[in-house]
Every structure is written in structure tokens, then in C-alpha cells.
Amino acid sequence: MADVQGEQPAAHELRVSVVSADQEVWSGAAKQIIARTMVGQIGILAGHEPILAILGAGEVRITTPTGELITAQAEDGFLSVDHDIVTIVARNASLD
């Protein structure tokens, strides 16, 4: 698990934190996130407008700056984007 608290994201990168009810599941830098919301899938890249969305049960795919794909299952929560900082909070979240 990468610790990026207090760091500003690099240009064209996102700072991401995936949190379940009882622990931080993953945090680190990413170049893209794809998540399921209640109204469909959403893709997040650096520079995305601020948004708050309710998560639908399903997969969250995080692509790191090196191209590694991190996959997590998340349900009962929300996704927040503000100034290239993405927070995914779910009652149940786990890495695949």
C-alpha cells in the first residue's frame, strides 16, 4: 500500500484512496479510474471536474502511472473527486 498523504498529485495523475468501513484498502497514484455508479460507469482522469457519486456494487479499476491494473470490489458507498484527489468510500471494499 502506497502512502501518499500530504503529497500533491503529479501533473496528469490522480491521488487515490479506497477505504472500507474498517480499513484503508489501497492508496496511491493513478492515471485512470473506472467505477460503477448508480447511473452507470464513470471514468476519471486527471483534471476531472469535482463530482460526488453514489457507488453501485461492482468493480473499481485503477490504472497506475506504470500501467499496473488494481481491481477492487466495492459496494454501498460513494466516490468523490476534487482537485485530482479521488476518495472511494464503501461499506464493503476489498482488492481482487
Image: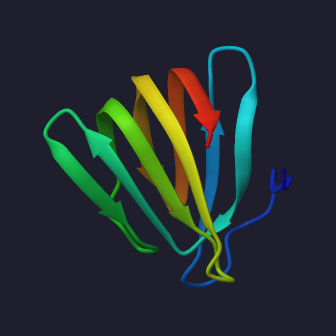
The structure residue drawn at horizontal position 63% and vertical position 15%, both measured from the top left corner, is 21
Q: Is residue 91 left or right of residue 36?
A: right
The structure residue drawn at horizontal position 13% and vertical position 39%, both measured from the top left corner, is 39
Relative image position of residue 53 (x, y in whole percent): 29, 37
Relative image position of residue 67 (x, y in whole percent): 61, 81
Between 17 and 85, the one lying in front of the other is 17
Relative image position of residue 64 (x, y in whole percent): 63, 72
How many numbered circles are shown?
0
The structure residue drawn at horizontal position 23% and vertical position 51%, both measured from the top left corner, is 41
* Figure quadrant of the C terminus: top right
Q: Find the residue positioned furthest to the left.
A: 39
Q: Relative to 76, is 57 above or below?
A: below
Q: Relative to 21, is 3 above or below?
A: below
Between 21 and 70, the one lying in front of the other is 70
Q: Relative to 34, is 39 above or below?
A: above
Image color mode:
rainbow
